[in-house]
Image (cartoon, rainbow, N blue to C red):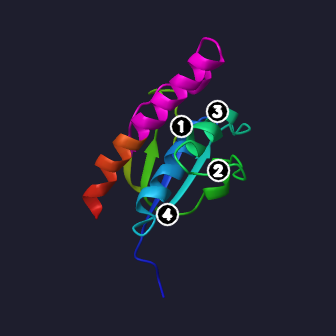
Amino acid sequence: MASNKKKVIFICKNNSGRSQMAEALLKNTYSNHYEVYSAGSEPLKINPLTIEVLSEIGIDISQNKSKSLEKFQGQEFDYVVSLCDEGACPVFIGGKTHIHQEFPDPREFKGDDKARLESFRNLRDGIQGWIKKEFSREI
């Protein structure tokens, strides 16, 4: 039986922060309606603070791995969502609808551990709010 879930891929450069958060948050919020992936053009290890701030709200991505966009070449997605700064985001062909929503790069967050953790929380909450608004329209 074919799934009638919409396929979504969140993309950014490293697949270590923003796109990982977005993937986990959309899966957690609307998994009955969306099949969700994330990838980056230059994947790096997932930032430990990404894992920490998601675990604070009951989402465990500690076993996730960063994925390369190359893994998804040739696949068709209903939505390709880029989350990085305009011009810094990779391009992915294969989406029926492209959405660009800019969020700050967590690798640029400054300060001590406490300040950086708070910045990650703010990023998580911003992405979560945007996902609830943007993706509830399809439901």
Task: State if disc 2 and disc 3 touch (CB < 8 Å).
Answer: no
Q: Which residue is mark 2?
A: 61
**Residue 14 on the magenta segment:** no
Horizontally, residue 54 falls left or right of residue 80, namely right
Q: Amino acid at mark 1?
A: Arg
Foreground disc of the pair 4, 2: 2
Looking at marks 4 and 3 on the same chain, the residue that comes earlier in the sequence is marked by: 3
Q: Secondary structure at mark 1?
A: helix
Disc 4 and disc 2: Cα gap in Å?
25 Å
State the quadrant of the C terminus: bottom left
Q: Amino acid at mark 4?
A: Glu
Foreground disc of the pair 1, 4: 1
Residue at 66%, 51% in the rendered image: 70
Foreground disc of the pair 3, 1: 3
Q: Which residue is mark 1?
A: 18
Disc 3 and disc 1: Cα gap in Å?
11 Å
Q: Which residue is mark 4?
A: 76
Q: How many marks?
A: 4
Q: Which residues are magenta?
A: 99-127
Residue at 51%, 41% in the rendered image: 91
